[in-house]
Structure formats: C-alpha cells, structure tokens
Image (spheres, helix red, strand yellow):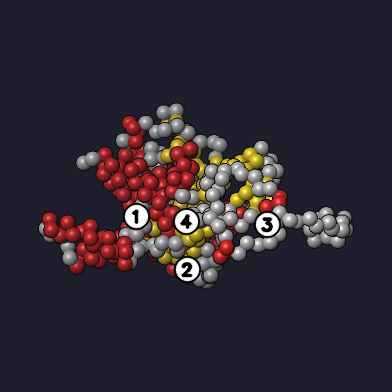
C-alpha cells in the first residue's frame, strides 16, 4: 500500500475508534464557554478532539459549516449562538462520529428549543460529493466490472453537479477545529479551494488548527500514528496563512496564537492557532474618484491585492477596495475620502489599481472647486467648534 493510503486509512481507523472510546492523546485542552456546554450531553464533550474554539467568531443568524465535526460539539455550540434564525451543518467522513453526533442532535434541540443542526457525510477536501448519496447509488448498482469502475468518475461528477453536498456561495462562516492538518498534503490546496467555493461573498472562514514552527521532515510525515495524532500533517505557521492567500482570501488574521506549544516532537514545536479569513475581493475595479487615508500606527501597510498605503496619504482606490477596506477586519483603520460629486456606476471607467498612487484633493473635490465657507463644527455631529 502506498504511504498516502496508509496514512488516510490510519486516520479513518483512529477516529472511528475514538468515536467509540474517548482517546486522551487526541485532545488539546480547550476552554469553551461553559454556558453553551450545559445542554450538550457528556458523551459529546468527553470525545472532544479539538484544539481551539472557532465558534467564538460565529454570529447570530449565520449559516455555519463545521469541517470534520466529529461528535458535534462545535456544531451544538454554534447552534445556540446562531439561534433559531441560523443553521449549522457538520461534515465528517467517519460513520461512527456521525452516529454519535446524529444521535445527540435531537437531545440538544429539545434542550435549546430549536432544531437547526444537521450532519452530512463527506470528505472536507471534496465538499461537492455527498458520500451517502454515493452509497445509495452504489447500493443499487454495485461495481461488478471494470466497465462499472470506469463509469464511476461520471457518476461522481453527476452527483457533484446535481446534488452537491454543500452548495457554492451558500455559507456565512466555515469553521473547523483541528481537522485540516489530517488531510493529505497533496489534497490541501483543493481543501482551501473548497472552503472558498462554498462561502458566500463577504463570508469568512474561522479555522482552529495545529501548526508547526519548522517544516515537518518527510520521515515524520511518513509516521501514520503521528499524522493521525494531529502532529505530522501540520502545515508551518507561515504556510498555513499562505494557503488562505493562495485560495483567494483577504483580511487573513491570526485571531489566536498560543505562544506555548501544545507538543514538541524532535525539537519541532506544534501549537494551536485560530485564523480568520474573508472571501470577497474578487471582481472588476472601477474609478469613482475615491481615496482612503491609512490612519496608522504602522508607517505603511500592504493589502492582499498588493495596494500599498502610506500612513496619512490619500491613496487612490477603486470602488470595490474603497468599500472593502472600510468593513470586516479593516473597519476603523482607514478614513474614507469620497468625491464631492458621485460618479454614476454607468459612467465609471475601469480603474487601473496603480499601487500606492496618490489621489490629488482636486480629483475628489473637482478641478474647478473654489468654495470659501464659514467656520463649521470640528467634530462631526456637534455644532460647536
Ligand atoms: C481531531 S478530530 C476533531 C473533531 C471535532 N472537530 C472536535 O472538535 O472534536 C478530527 C475529525 O475530522 C474527521 N476527519 C478527518 N479527516 C477528514 C476528512 N478528510 N474529511 C472529513 N472528515 C475528516 C475525523 O473523522 C474526526 O471526526
């Protein structure tokens, strides 16, 4: 058997066992908000294999997707945070984990008074493929010949297109707790692309995972037990953030960084981090004569599109960047300078996002602007100077 298959099967077996019998070595102690734990059955809490708490960044009304939901703890916490208006979907590939989560879901629903959680079977690097639908298809038409086998790719493609496990642009927040590291290295770019695909524009990923301070050597990566124990599949802390960048996210931020390592193996430190990243910088740039002034405290900053903002400088931006950098993780960091006369969208020209170009005040006020005014209030919303 090749190394990747051996690693994958070890992950499958270890988590199937850990769903039956709690395994302490898989747990990295986490302090969850106790008020949400009260309604969650002990069996779920005891089989906690997380390393962080991404549910802290979930909001009321959100549609949440939890990748590698295990026995369901983060889903059951999120269910209470989003309330009856929101919904939560947990995805896991392990039948035994799904069995525990699904059996406990009605108990939690009964205790909190709303039923908004469901668990689906799939692999998180392939969120299009519903594995229970595939089971049903294969149950009716088992693979009995090489011809059947060759048709399988068409069957799975049809399932992804017609009955996707998770729809494109359908999720407000993708969370995950200690799972991405378990996915094989070659599949990791696909995994980040899938997270990006299922999020709505403006949606966010909040991922708690284990990262390493140095690259994990190949010999350690080949150790299937270390891999399934959330150690040797860990990405480096830099590589983890870069994977979000490569997938097209912006506003990527380490919202939690444990300075103390969870474990050190052969001198390499493994620690828990939580990263939040946003979807929504894609699209065309149009000129509306707008500028943003970066307020500091850094001398200059660079955004995920490569725009450089020097502190205090009126920097020319397109309409998309103008709005993007006043919201989400950037809110409050830039002062907006809007044109005195708005440019209609129908008349806006394509804008070449020249990096760091200054916006002359006359461009926002108008070339002929020569007003002289009475002294007004210095502070918006007040009448005195
Ligand atoms: C370390 S446990 C974390 C479980 C849960 N998030 C928690 O906080 O307790 C990893 C979980 O991810 C699931 N898993 C691992 N690799 C997966 C994959 N490629 N696709 C879907 N689920 C996966 C396992 O079955 C297991 O339930």
How many other residues sit within 10 Å of disc 1, few (<14), some (14-19) or many (≥20)?
some
Circle 3 crowding by C-alpha within 10 Å: few under 14, some 14–19, many from 20: some
User: Which residue shows up at 44% across the image and 54% down it?
Assistant: 196
Report x, y in % for residue 383. 86, 61
Q: Look at the picture and state if 269 lies above or below 357.
A: above
Q: Earlier along the polypeptide chain: callout 3 or callout 4?
A: 4
Secondary structure at numbered mark 1:
loop
Work out whether residue 126 or residue 7 is closer to the camera in this orientation and state it: 126
Instruction: Give the number of the disc on residue 338.
Output: 3
Q: Which mark is residue 116?
A: 2
In what element is the residue under mark 4?
Answer: strand
C-beta proximity under 8 Å, tags 1 and 3: no
Between label 2 and label 3, give the one nearer the viewer: 3
- From the top left corner, tell me how far across and down residue 239 is, in percent: 45, 39
Q: Residue furthest top?
A: 267
Q: Which of the two labelled residues, at mark 1 and mark 3, occupies the earlier sequence position?
A: 1
Question: 10 Å neighbourhood of mark 2: few (<14), some, or many (≥20)?
Answer: many
């Amino acid at each position: 058997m090749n190394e990747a298959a051996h690693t994958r099967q070890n992950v499958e077996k270890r988590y199937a066992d850990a769903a039956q019998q709690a395994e302490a070595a898989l747990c990295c102690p986490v302090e969850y908000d106790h008020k949400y734990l009260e309604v969650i059955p002990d069996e779920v809490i005891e089989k906690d294999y997380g390393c962080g708490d991404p549910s802290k960044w979930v909001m009321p009304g959100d549609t949440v997707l939890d990748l590698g939901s295990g026995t369901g703890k983060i889903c059951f916490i999120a269910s209470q945070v989003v309330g009856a208006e929101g919904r939560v979907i947990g995805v896991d590939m392990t039948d035994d984990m799904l069995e525990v989560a699904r059996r406990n879901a009605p108990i939690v629903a009964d205790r909190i008074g709303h039923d908004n959680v469901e668990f689906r079977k799939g692999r998180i690097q392939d969120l299009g493929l519903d594995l229970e639908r595939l089971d049903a298809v294969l149950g009716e038409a088992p693979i009995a010949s090489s011809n059947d086998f060759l048709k399988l790719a068409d069957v799975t493609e049809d399932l992804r297109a017609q009955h996707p496990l998770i729809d494109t642009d359908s999720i407000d927040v993708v969370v995950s707790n200690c799972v991405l590291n378990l996915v094989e290295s070659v599949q990791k770019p696909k995994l980040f692309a899938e997270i990006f695909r299922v999020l709505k524009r403006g949606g966010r990923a909040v991922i708690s995972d284990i990262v390493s301070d140095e690259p994990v050597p190949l010999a350690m990566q080949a150790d299937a037990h270390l891999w399934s124990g959330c150690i040797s599949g860990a990405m480096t802390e830099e590589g983890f953030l870069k994977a979000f960048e490569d997938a097209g996210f912006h506003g990527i931020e380490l919202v939690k960084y444990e300075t103390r390592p969870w474990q050190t193996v052969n001198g390499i430190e493994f620690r828990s981090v939580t990263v939040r990243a946003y979807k929504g910088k894609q699209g065309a740039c149009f000129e509306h004569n707008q500028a943003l002034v970066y307020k500091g405290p850094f001398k200059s900053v660079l955004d995920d599109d490569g725009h450089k903002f020097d502190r205090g400088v009126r920097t020319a931006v397109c309409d998309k960047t103008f709005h993007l950098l006043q919201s989400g993780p950037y809110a409050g960091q830039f002062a907006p300078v809007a044109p005195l006369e708005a440019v209609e969208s129908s008349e806006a020209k394509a804008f070449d996002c020249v990096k760091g170009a200054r916006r002359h005040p006359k461009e926002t006020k108008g070339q002929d602007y020569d007003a002289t005014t009475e002294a007004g209030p210095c502070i918006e919303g007040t009448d005195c100077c």
